[in-house]
Amino acid sequence: MTGVSLDQLKETPGARPGETRDVRIKRLGMRSMRRGIKEMDIILHRYATDRLAHMNEDELDLYESLLGENDQDLYQWVSGQQEPPDHLTDLIEHIIACTAMR
């Protein structure tokens, strides 16, 4: 490794240059269902399908930052095995609640 911290390797959330809201929502939806761990594919794809279109830009930014997290960590947070980071707690709780309603 070149000495670059992991925080610097994560994507910066936000719309890409020239990207419309609809395209961004589709991109985030695709990222939600192509995670690598099947359980997270299912959980996040369902959540994205139900919620992305209703999110404001700040909420989309937060969700996009969540998508930059490791699947193993995400699964542990969603399954209640570990506490999520403070900045993601509300979003993780919302995902859990939406998953439980299905």
Image (cartoon, helix red, strand yellow):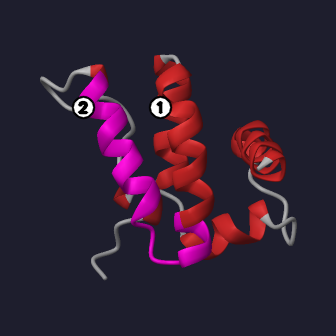
Give the distance between the C-alpha atoms of the residues marked 2 and 1, in whole angstroms. 14 Å
Q: Give the main secondary structure, helix, strand or loop, of the magenta stretch.
A: helix
Q: Residue type at mark 2: give it.
A: Val
**Between discs 2 and 1, the one toward the N terminus:** 2
**Quadrant, the N terminus:** bottom left
On screen, residue 92 versus residue 83, left or right, reads left
Label of residue 38 in the image:
none
**Residue at which label 2 appears:** 23
The residue located at (52%, 66%) in the rendering is: 41
On screen, residue 66 versus residue 84, left or right, reads left
The residue located at (34%, 73%) in the rendering is: 3
Q: Can residue 55 be seen at all in this image of the molecule?
A: no
Disc 2 element:
helix
Q: Nearer the viewer, residue 74 or 2?
A: 74
Outermost residue, left direction?
18
Does 68 lie within the magenta span? no
- Name the mark nearer the viewer: 2 or 1: 2
Q: Can residue 5 be seen at all in this image of the molecule?
A: yes
